[in-house]
Image (spheres, rainbow, N blue to C red):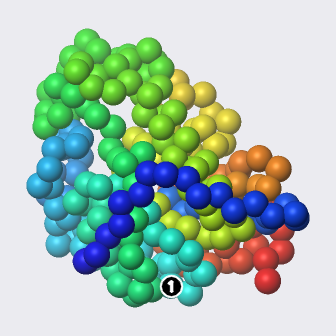
Amino acid sequence: MTMIRAMGTEIVSGDRPAPSTLIILVRHGVTPTTGQVLPGRAPGLHLSEAGEEQARGVAERLAGLPLAAIYTSPMERARETAAPTAERLGLTPIIWEGIVECDFGEWTGGQLGELSRLPEWKTVQKKPSEFRFPGGESFVEMQARMAASLEEIAARHKGEVVVCFSHADPIKAAVAHLGGTPLDSFQGITIEPASVSVAQFTSDGGTAMLETNSTTGSVKDLVAHPRGEKRS
C-alpha cells in the first residue's frame, strides 16, 4: 500500500474563522505481545489475527465519515491498523513521525512483568513527568511532540475531520494535554487496542475531548454534531 511521508506544514488561511477540526485518535490493534512486552520502536512487530480483525472493525466504525486524511505512526502495527480504513475510503495514509510510539530506550523489548518490579516503575506510574527512559525519551518530550503534531495536523485541515493511528502512551498523553489533565495523572487514562478517541480543535484555539477510549458503535454521530457546533 502506498504511503506518503510528511513533516512540513501547509496552512491555508482565509478571511473567516474556520469551523472546528476533529482529529480521531485510534490505537493500533493487538499484537502477539500486547500486554506482555514493551515493544517501543523495535521493528517487525505486526498485528495478530485478532488485531487484524480489530483493524477491520475500526474501518467499519469510521465508515461514512467525511475523512479528509489518514495519518499513521511509522510502526508496522499502526500502519496495518490504518490499512483497512485507507482501502475502504481510497485514501493514501500519511506517515507522521510525531505520532510514533514512545522511545523506551534500553527498556525496549523488556517484559512488563520484570519492568514493573524495577524501583523506577513507581516513578513511571506516579510521577511520569520526572522520568526519562534510559537511553530514550522522557514522557514530557513524548507529550510535547504529540501535542505539537496534533496542532500541526489540525492547522493543515481546518474545519475537516482526520484520523491518526498511534499508540497507547502517546494517545494517553495527548488526551491528558487536550483535556487539561496533568501529565502525572495520565497513567490513569485507559486507551485500549483499536479504541477511538475524538479531539476537537476550535477556530479560536480551544481544544476538547469529545470521546475517549470508545470501543463500540459508530463514530459518525460525534462528528456530525461536535460540541458547540452544527455541521452540515
Asked whether residue 49 appears in the rendered view, the answer is yes
Asked whether 223 or 121 is in front, the reply is 223
Residue with the mark numbered 1: 63
Q: In this view, does 2 lie to the left or right of 155?
A: left
Q: Position of residue 186 (x, y in %)?
A: 51, 34
At a point 58% along the width and 50% down the height, the residue shown is 152
Q: State which quadrant residue 177 falls in.
A: top right
Q: Where is residue 19 in the image (x, y as percent from the top left)?
A: 79, 65
Quadrant for the N terminus in the image:
bottom left
Q: Where is residue 39 in the image (x, y as percent from the top left)?
A: 19, 43
- Please determine whether, in this image, residue 139 is positioned above or below residue 202: above
Q: State which quadrant residue 162 falls in.
A: bottom right
Q: In this view, does 79 lie to the left or right of 155?
A: left
Amino acid type at mark 1: Ala
The 10 Å Cα crowd at callout 1, few under 14, some 14 to 19, many 20 or more, is: some
At a point 51% along the width and 71% down the height, the residue shown is 69
Asked whether 66 or 221 is in front, the reply is 66
Q: Where is residue 134 in the image (x, y as percent from the top left)?
A: 24, 19
- Please determine whether, in this image, residue 68 is positioned above or below residue 43: below
At a point 50% along the width and 78% down the height, the residue shown is 62
Q: SS of the residue at dot 1?
A: loop
Asked whether residue 28 appears in the rendered view, the answer is no
- Please determine whether, in this image, residue 60 is positioned above or below residue 201: below
